[in-house]
Amino acid sequence: MANSAITVTGLRVVRGGREVVKDIGFETPRGRITGLLGPSGCGKTTLMRSIVGVQIVAGGDVTVLDLPAGSPPLRRLIGYATQNPAIYADLTIAEALRYFASVLRAPLSDVDRVIAEVGLTDHADKLVGSLSGGQHSRANLAVALLGKPELLVLDEPTVGLDPLLRDELWALFRRLADGGATLLVSSHVMDEAARCDHLLLMREGRILADDTPDRLRERTGTADLEQAFLRLVRAASKPEVTPS
Ligand SMILES: Nc1ncnc2c1ncn2[C@@H]1O[C@H](COP(=O)(O)OP(=O)(O)OP(=O)(O)O)[C@@H](O)[C@H]1O
Ligand SMILES: [Mg+2]
C-alpha cells in the first residue's frame, strides 16, 4: 500500500520471557478507521505500544507516517490513549488538559474543543479523581485528541461506556476519519468491528485476518463478524492433515 499510515513487518515482541507478538506484518490505510480486535491477552496493547514507539521489540520494522516508530517528530503527529488512564487525579479535567496541551505545545483553545468532543463540557471543573469510569476514560481520550494528531492510537477507548456514549464516540471517530485522521482502535467487543473500515483480528500474538468487514463476511460465509472471527479461529486451530 503506497499510502499506508502504519507498516509493520516481521514484528516480534518478548514480554515476561514469552514471545507475545509473533512475526506479524500488516499495513493500515490512511484516513480510515482500523479496528484491532481480539481476546484479552492476545497482544493488542503490546502491538499499539510498538506502533507508538514505547515498546522494546525483539525484531522487525514498524514505520508510522513514513518514519520509524519512536522517531521524535512522531510525538506530535500521534495521539495515544492508553488502556489505563494516566491523568492526574488531583486536577480538574480542564486543568489536566491545559497541562497536557502545554506539554504537547498544542494551542490552549484546543482544551475546550476536545472536552466538548468527548462530551465532558458539563464536567470540565470536576476533579479527575472523582469521575466515573466512563468519564475517566473519556477524559483520557480527550488528551489524545489535543493538537489534532494525524494518527490516533486508541486502546479500548469505549470500554465501560453505556451504548449511547459508545455510539457517540464512534460517531466522533468517524468524523475524525472524514477529516483526514487515521485511527487505530482496539476493542474486544466484536460489535464494534462493523464500525471500522478495516479490521485486524488478532489471536495469541498473531494476525488472523487483515481485511475489510465486508470481505471478511464474504470469506467466512457469515454476516455476523463475531461468527466470522470464530470461524477463522477454528480454521486456524485445525490440525494439518498429513497423508498417512
Ligand atoms: N508488563 C508485562 N510484563 C510481562 N508480560 C506482559 C506485560 N504486559 C503484558 N504482558 C503479556 O503480554 C501478552 C499480551 O498482553 P497485551 O496487554 O498486549 O494483551 P491485550 O490484547 O492488550 O489484552 P487486553 O484485551 O486484556 O488488554 C499477555 O500474555 C500478557 O500477559
Ligand atoms: Mg490491552
Image (tube, rainbow, N blue to C red):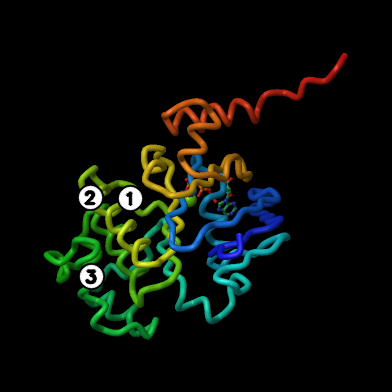
- State the residue position of label 2: 165
- Calculate the distance from the C-alpha at mark 3 to the C-alpha at mark 2: 18 Å
Give the class, few, some or many, for how many residues have Cα within 10 Å of label 1's Cα (few <14, many ≥20). many
Give amino acid for label 3: Ile
Q: Position of residue 240 (x, y in %)?
A: 76, 24
Sequence order check, earlier mark of 1 and 3: 3
- State the residue position of label 3: 93
Residue at the (59%, 72%) spot, across then down: 66
On screen, residue 86 versus residue 138, left or right, reads: right
Residue at the (35%, 62%) spot, across then down: 178
Q: Position of residue 175 (x, y in %)?
A: 30, 60
Q: Looking at the rendered structure, which numbered label has been put on residue 121?
A: none
- State the residue position of label 1: 158
Q: Residue furthest left?
A: 122
Give amino acid for label 2: Leu
Q: Position of residue 173 (x, y in %)?
A: 33, 58
Of badges 3 and 2, the one in the foreground is 2
Provide the secondary structure element on which disc 2 rests. helix
Residue at the (26%, 78%) spot, across then down: 110
Sequence order check, earlier mark of 3 and 2: 3
Q: Position of residue 201 (x, y in %)?
A: 53, 42
Q: Is residue 77 above or below residue 216?
A: below
Sequence order check, earlier mark of 2 and 1: 1
- Calculate the distance from the C-alpha at mark 2 to the C-alpha at mark 1: 8 Å
Give the class, few, some or many, for how many residues have Cα within 10 Å of label 2's Cα (few <14, many ≥20). some
On screen, residue 159 versus residue 207, left or right, reads: left
